[in-house]
Each structure stands twice: as C-alpha cells, then as structure tokens.
Image (tube, rainbow, N blue to C red):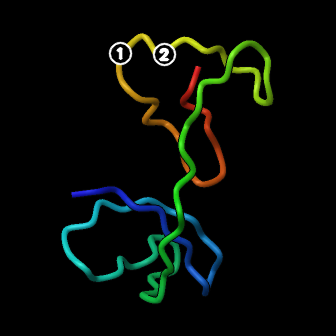
Amino acid sequence: MPIYEYKCPECAAEFEELVFGDGLPACPRCGGTNSERLISRPCLHLPGDAHDGYSASAPSSGGGCGGCTASSCAGCH
C-alpha cells in the first residue's frame, strides 16, 4: 500500500495519503474529492555541499530518507 502525494485543486493544499485502492482521497483541509496525484521527488544524498548541503552518508537508520515531501527534503540529514 503506497503513500502518494496529492494536491487539491480547490484549496491548493498538498498532502500525503496511504492508498488502499484506486479512489482519490479527500483533501484534509477542505474535504474536496478532486485531488490530483503528484510525482514524488526522490531524496538524494549528494557528496559534500553539492546543491543542497546534505552529506553523502546514508541516514543512521540504515534505510532511505523517508522524510521527503513534494516541497521539502527536511528529513534527510
């Protein structure tokens, strides 16, 4: 069951939702049901200070970042 990112065309809210089927989730801000699924940006660890200042090392949890959203990669440290 993947987590997808959505944007509500009615109030412009961006949100993530765990999807159990083919239906579109309701917007948590306005309740709109016409949300569009966004293409998620991957979290990349770049060497040194290239582009975003994050180091090339993987997170101490040993897995992927898990903290990325459509507008932020704040979970990658």
Image quadrant in which you'd find residue 51: top right
Residue linked to disc 2: 58
Taking the spot 50% from the left edge, 62% from the top edge, the residue there is 15
Image quadrant in which you'd find residue 31: bottom left
For the residue marked with disc 2, what is the amino acid? Ala
Neighbours of disc 2 within 10 Å: few (<14), some (14-19), many (20+)? some
Neighbours of disc 1 within 10 Å: few (<14), some (14-19), many (20+)? few
- Relative placement, left or right, of 19 versus 17 is left
Residue 40 x, y percent position in the rendering: 52, 56
> What is the tally of numbered marks visible in this picture?
2
Taking the spot 65% from the left edge, 75% from the top edge, the residue there is 12
Which quarter of the image is occupied by the C terminus? top right
Residue linked to disc 1: 62
- Between 37 and 16, the residue placed more toward the observer is 37
- Label 2: which secondary element: loop
Image height check: is 18 above or below 55? below
- Relative placement, left or right, of 46 versus 75 is right
- Between 33 and 64, the residue placed more toward the observer is 64
C-alpha separation, residue under disc 2 versus residue under disc 1: 7 Å
Image height check: is 73 above or below 21? above
Taking the spot 65% from the left edge, 14% from the top edge, the residue there is 55
Taking the spot 60% from the left edge, 25% from the top edge, the residue there is 45
Residue 29 x, y percent position in the rendering: 51, 72
Q: Would you say the residues marked 2 and 1 are in contact, meaning their CB atoms lie under 8 Å apart?
A: yes
Which quarter of the image is occupied by the N terminus? bottom left
For the residue marked with disc 1, what is the amino acid? Gly
